[in-house]
Image (cartoon, grey):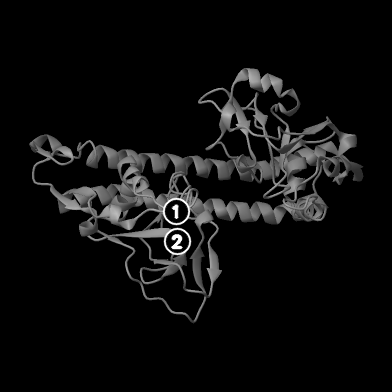
Amino acid sequence: MKRAKLKEICDRITVGHVGPMADQYTAVGIPFLRSQNVSPFRLQTEDIKFIPRHFHEKLRKSALHAGDVVVVRTGYPGTACVIPESMRESNCADLVVITPSQVLNPYYLAAIFNSAWGQATIAGKLVGVAQQHFNITTAREMEVVLAPRGIQDRIAHILSAYDDLIENNSRRIQILEQMARALYREWFVEFRFPGYEKLRRVASRLGSAPQGWELKYFPDCVDVDPRVVVSRDNEKPFVPMGSLASDSMLITDIESRTSNSGAKFRNGDTLFARITPCLENGKTGFVQFLPDPSAVACGSTEFIVLRSRMLTPEFVYLLARSEEFRNNAIKSMSGATGRQRVQERCFDKFVVAQPPRDVLERFSAVAAPLFGQVQVLHLQADNLRRTRDHLLPRLLSGQIILNEAAA
């Protein structure tokens, strides 16, 4: 084990493009990473922007290659991940870009940055007044413990095995979410539910709908912000806006607070963001983390809580995810630019085709297990992250003895 400065063991340490970018984004092109795409050990690909090739070639200094390590400069400075083999050509904005030399395993370097030691070291060396950031000069002078390359590879292999399992769970969650949305659309938008061939279609305000399905206004079948009584005396789960995902039902990073202010909700409720840009970004969550049906949690005042009356919890969540429902809400938004909010009266005239009870029960028999499996996979991934994060400092410090033999 020896100590070395990063500038001594890296082939390149630079910074991504700094400056306005919105007018350069294209629908397709070269992937362009930002700080929100970098999480510990993992590149988040859900919201990657793209730039044209000619602009990518102009930004040669910040061009990325597989095996490079990217480090967040502002917001969550020090958060790091490795550019995967699947992304052989990309670029970035305002990230520290590091190309390790042959003596340094990229994943081992990312582990150093993501460790408690790395985070504390960077936090103590941030510069700037209005917005503190991880300076490139600090990165070059940062001194790290350099294990023999064989030990680095063993550590990288162990940690990456956890990340592969976490990534596998994330992919399965995405597939289950897509399946649930596709099922909802097939049954309740296209009206191709089991046995649909036996029913005539009749003209309605929603277009052609199955005969016998009642058309109801949304508040007749869903409670909007239902009243929930909650004790002031003890701590309870609290869900901030940041806990909602833009692309799935998951609610993560749940806090604990004694206050009972804000939205109140139970298992089976849907949390719908009322404020811009959270609504446009798709923030919507399905509550299924509480221990029992009577348990109550609190959350952001910017949530609209939706609870099924005549439908099912899964139906309500998937309806809230539908383009028709979201567009109706977005059109109602009012207020100062940048802080506009949904007007709840927009739901008063929103029409829902009320399926017969037997169709709803058959739908829940399929959808509810999908929702439950999403939560199980999420909990498994959380356990894997905690185990990995527990191992990380012990591996880097040598508390767990490894040899240089291949894994």
Q: Residue at x 75, y 55 (%)?
A: 116
| Residue 364 % position (x, y) | 27, 51
Name the residue at the bottom extreme: 233
CB under 8 Å between discs 2 and 1: yes
Q: Amino acid at mark 1?
A: Gln
Mark 1, residues whose alpha carbon is within 10 Å: few (<14), some, or many (≥20)?
many
Residue 192 screen position, x and y as percent: 20, 36
The quarter of the rendered structure image containing the N terminus is top right
In the rendered image, which residue does mark 1 sit on?
375
Mark closest to the chain's N terminus, 2 or 1: 2
| 407, 254: nearer the viewer | 254
> Does residue 190 appear to the left or right of 59 in the view shown?
left
Would you name the residue on which mark 2 appears?
A: 289
Residue at image position (43%, 79%) is 231
Q: Position of residue 73 (x, y in %)?
A: 73, 44
Q: Quadrant of residue 195?
A: top left
Q: Quadrant of residue 297?
A: bottom left
Q: Out of 3 and 6, give the one closest to the viewer.
A: 6
On the image, the x and y values in percent for residue 375 come to 45, 53
Would you say residue 109 is visible in this rendering? yes
Q: Is residue 407 visible?
A: no
Asked which secondary structure carries label 2, the reply is: loop
Task: Name the element at disc 1.
Answer: helix
Image side of residue 250 versus residue 400, left or right: left
> Amino acid under label 2?
Phe
* Quarter of the image that includes the C terminus: top right
Left or right of 118, for residue 302: left
175, above or below 311, in the image: above
Relative horizontal placement of residue 18, taking residue 100 as reference (left or right): left
